[in-house]
Amino acid sequence: MTVIHRNNVVLSGRVRGTPMMFAHGFGCDQNMWRYVAPAFEDDYRVILFDHVGAGRSDLSAYDRARYSSLDGYAADILEICRELELREVIFVGHSVSAMMGVLAAAEDPERFARLVLVGPSPRYLDDDDYVGGFAREDIDELLDSLDNNYLGWSAAMAPAIMGNPTRPELTEELTNSFCRTDPQIAKQFARVTFLSDNRDDLARVSVPTLVLQTQEDVIAPMEVGAYVERALPQGQLVVLNATGHCPNLSAPEETINAINTFLATG
Amino acid sequence: VSGEISDDVLPGILEENIEELYEDAPVGYLSTAADGTILKANRTFLTLCGFDAADLVGRRRFYDLLPPGAKIYYETHYAPLLRMQQDVREIAIEVVRADGRRVPVLVNARLKNEPGVPALIRLTVSDASDRRRYERELLAARVEAESRAAAASALQHVKEGVVLVDDDGLIVVLNPAASRLFGVEIERAVGLRLASVVPGWAAVAPRIAVGRHHEAAASVVVPLAVEADTLWIAASAEFAAEGIVYTLRDVTADRRLEEFRDDIVSIVSHELRTPVAGVYGAAQTLAAHGAQLDQDARNRLTEMIVEQSGRLSRILEEILLTEQLDANNVLLEQTAFTPAEVVARVVGVSALWRHTRPVRIARLEGTHADGDPGLFEQALVNVLDNAMKYSPSGGEIVVSVVAHRASVRVTIADGGPGVAPSDAERIFEKFFRSDPGHATGVTGTGLGLYIARELMRRMRGRVGMLPSDRGATFFLDLPAAS
C-alpha cells in the first residue's frame, strides 16, 4: 500500500458509492477540501490525498525528475485509482490539479466519468495573443515570496508536518501548518506549476467537464476559464459569484451546489 | 511607583485616547471584508504604504496592494490558511506603496466570522525592511555555503589531482586524486610544504609555469619522483585568490604507450631488418644466379633462408604472445607434472640449436610441480635462450632441478658478463635491453624474459636472478604439487 502512504490517501463516505476524488492545488494540502468534501460523503466514496511534497505525503518519495512536469503528478493520480481499483471516477481538481486531472483523463479515459475543474489554467504565462495573466518575472517574484516565507521552516519539523494521524496535536502546534512543506520542494512545485503549458492537452479529454470560474481570480482570470471551456470537447463553464482563487474555501455552499447541479445533469 | 513614574501620574499617562492608540500604534492596522476590501486602516499603515485613507477604504482590497508574484502567494497560501485556520501568522510579503516603491512587511491576520454578521478580517502589517535585509543576507550566505559545499564535493570526484598551496607554500587543499597520485594521505599533507611531502617536487616545481588568475599556463609533462616510483605528470598552475592551484594529471600510462610504440619501431628497424634482408638477399641470389652457383653455395643460401625466416617467425610469435599476455588472453591448463622431464627434453633439443653453448645438467630431481607444462617449457626456453645469447662462445651453461622449500626450482647459470644488480628486476620488464644502442651486437626483441616472467606469474610461480660471483644465475620456481 505504498501509494496510499506516499500520497496520504484518506477515504470516507459511502463504501460502495461512486468514487469522487478531490485533488488540492499548489500551496496547501487536502485540507483545502474541508468545507466541500463532507457534503458528498452521504452519496459518494470520497477520496482525498496530498500531492507528494505537500501536506502529510511521504517527502522522501519526492523525486525531482518524476515531478519535473505535471505528468508525474498525473501518474500518481492514476496509480491511486489503480491501487483502489476505482472506476467511473468523478475527479475534482483545484487550480493546478485541474490540469493534472486533464492529463490523467487523457491518459486513461476509462477511469473517469466526469471532471470538475476549479479555477483551472492550462498556461499561467502570457504567450503571444494568449492571456494567462502572468509574466516570467512574476513567477520569479513568487519564488522569492516562497524563499522569504520558508526561513522558519526547518527539517526538524518535517516529521511533524508529514505527521502521524494518531497525534494531530503535533501539527496543530505549527504555524500555518496546512501550507508548509520543504522549501526546495515548494519552489520546484511552483516552477513546474506556473511554467507548465497544457493547452494542447485539453482537447484530449473525452468526458463531460465542469469548469468552475470565480469573479476576479488573479491566478485563473475569466478569459482563461473561457479558453478552457472552448478547448474542452465537452466543457461547461459555470461562473460563480464567489471571488478569489479558492471558492472551495470562501464559498463552499455555492461550490457544492454547482458541482451537484453538474452531476445531476446528463 | 512603577520605575521612574509615580503611581498618581501613571493612570493619566495610560488613559490614552483609544482613537490615538489605534491610529498611532507601532504597527499598521487594517480591517477588511471577507473578500479583502479595505474597510478601515490606521495612520501607521497609511504612512507605511503612502496612500490616503480615501484611496483605500471601500476602493481597494488588501491584495490590490501586492505585486503580481506576491498575489499568487496570497491566493495560494495566505487566503486558504485564513479560511482554514482563522488566523495566519508572520506572512512575509511585499506591499507596493503609492509611489511604486515596495516595502517588505510582515502580516498577521485573523478572520472574525460570527453567525449573522458579515465576516471581518483584521490584519496587522509591520515594516520588515531591516529584517528582510538580514534574511536576504542569510539566504545569500546559505546559497554561498551550498555552492561551496558543492564545489568541495566536486573536487572530491575530479580525476585530476588538484592542490592549492598558499602564499607561504603550505598545502591548503589536496584532493583525493592528488592524494592517490602522490601516495600521501590528505590529513598528513595539509599544512606542510609540497616539497616535503613529495620527494621529487622541488625538482619539478620550477618547470611548472604559473598562469595568471583564470588563465592557466600551458601544462608541462615532467617526471616526478613519488614514494616508490617515478611518474610522468602533466602539470599546470594558476594564481588564485588563496594562493596557487596546481592541476596534475598522471600521464605515465600514455608515456608508456609512447615508449611501447618506440620499442615496436625499434624492433621493426633493428630486429626484423636483418633477417628480412638475409632472406631477401639469399632468395634474390638464388633466383638470379642459382644456375651458376655450385651445390654448396646453393645449400648455404637455402639454409640462410630457413634460419632467418625461423628467426622472423620467433620474433613475430613473441610479439603475438606479449599481446596475448597483455590482454590476459593466454589459456592456462594447470596440472601436476615433472619439471625435470621438461628440462631434460629442452636441454636435449637445445643441443640441436645453432650456435649453442654446451649445456650441462648438474642435478635433476623428479619432484612434481603444479603448472602448465607447455607454458613452463616456453618460459624455460626463453631463459635458456637468453643465457646462450650472453654466454661467451664455448662458455658452459649449467642447469639443475631441485626441490627448494615448497617449490621446485630450476636454475640456469651462465658464464656471461652477468647483470648489474640495479638491473636484476628490470631485465624482466617489457622491451628492456641492457644495451639500448644495440652496441654489443646481441640481438633480441627484449620480450623473452618479460614473457617468461608473465608466464611463470600466471602459474603462481616466479622467475628471477640469484646473486652470483661470475655470470648470471636465473631461477624458475613452480609450487610443488600438493
Image (tube, grey):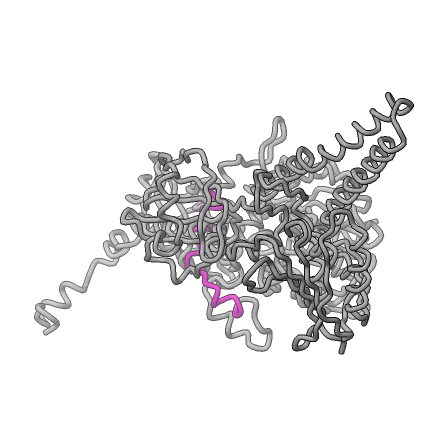
Residue B398, above or below B93: below
Please give the range of residues in magenta.
Answer: A141-160
Residue nearest the viewer, comparing B478 with B16:
B478
Q: Is residue A158 magenta?
A: yes
Image side of residue B282 versus residue B16, left or right:
right
Image side of residue A232 versus residue B261, left or right:
right
Q: Is residue B366 magenta?
A: no
Residue A151 in view, yes or no = yes
Looking at the rendered image, the quarter that the N terminus of chain B falls into is bottom left
Q: Residue at x 82, y 62 (%)?
A: B345
Image side of residue A139 versus residue B286, left or right:
left
Measured as percent of width and height from the top left, residue A135 is found at 53, 34
Measured as percent of width and height from the top left, residue A154 is found at 45, 63
Examine the residues drawn in magenta and state their main secondary structure. helix
Measured as percent of width and height from the top left, residue B19 is found at 26, 55
Image side of residue B219 versus residue B480, left or right:
left
Residue nearest the viewer, comparing B53 with B203:
B203
The residue most toward the right is B291
Measured as percent of width and height from the top left, residue B255 is found at 56, 42
Residue nearest the viewer, comparing B96 with B428:
B428
Residue B23, above or below A134: below
Indicate the quadrant where residue B415 lies. bottom right
Q: Residue at x 42, y 59 (%)?
A: B186
Residue B293, above or below A115: above
Q: Residue at x 48, y 57 (%)?
A: B228
Residue nearest the viewer, comparing B307 with A164:
B307
